[in-house]
Amino acid sequence: LSSLPTYYIPRDGSLHSYQDYITLLPNIDRPEAFGQHPNADITSQIIESRNLFETLMSLQIQSTSSLAESKEDKVGKLASDVLSKIPQVIDYENTEKLIGADKKPLDVVLLQEISR
């Protein structure tokens, strides 16, 4: 069982009481819910990002010409496209307010990167 108070076995009850309990559960599970260290969330996010880029690369039309781009060039173009969509300046104070007081490890890293 989880050490977090959010996750517990509900008392015996009706179907409606179980449905109510389920609606109270968070949409995103914290690593601690499964007995993992909070940094496990960062590793999971890195893996998801890598999978996203690999999927995007696999969906691109394959070139058959002899001047086909290398994988590195394709990744570079994709990364440049993603970077072009990110704002140049991210407001630290506003972002910190949006995150709130309960900062996860990934939130701390985000704020550190914004302050650079």
Image (spheres, helix red, strand yellow):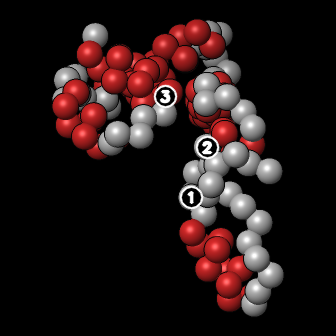
Q: For mark 1, give the secondary structure.
A: loop
Picture residue at 74% right of the left edge, 72% below the top:
10
User: 10 Å neighbourhood of mark 2: few (<14), some, or many (≥20)?
Assistant: some
Percent position (x, y) of residue 15?
Answer: 75, 88
Up-down relation of residue 57 to residue 27 (above or below): above
The residue type indicated by label 3 comes to Leu
* Image marks 2 and 1: residues in contact by CB distance under 8 Å: yes
Task: Please state which amino acid type lies under the numbered disc 1.
Answer: Pro
Q: Are marks 2 and 3 in contact (CB under 8 Å)?
A: no
Distance CA(mark 2)–CA(mark 1): 9 Å
**Label 2 vs 3, first from the N-terminus:** 2
Badge 2 marks a residue whose secondary structure is loop
Q: Secondary structure at mark 3?
A: helix
Calculate the distance from the C-alpha at mark 2 to the C-alpha at mark 3.
Answer: 12 Å
Q: State which quadrant residue 26 falls in.
A: bottom right
Q: Which residue is mark 1?
A: 26
How many other residues sit within 10 Å of disc 1, few (<14), some (14-19) or many (≥20)? few
* Depth order, front residue of 104/58: 104
Q: Residue 3, how many percent across, how many down? A: 70, 46
Q: Residue at x 42, y 35 (%)?
A: 103
Query: In the image, what residue occupies the spot 25% across and 40% down?
Result: 97
Task: Say which residue label 2 marks.
Answer: 30
Q: Nearer the viewer, residue 116 or 82?
A: 116
> In the image shown, does 76 or 63 lie closer to the viewer?
76
Q: Which residue is identified by label 3?
A: 106
Q: Residues within 10 Å of mark 3 (few under 14, many from 20)?
A: some
Q: Give the side of residue 106 with respect to residue 30, left or right.
A: left
Q: Could you tell me which quadrant the C terminus lies in?
A: top left
Is residue 50 visible from the viewing direction of this image?
Answer: no
Residue 28 in sight: yes
Q: Amino acid at mark 2?
A: Arg
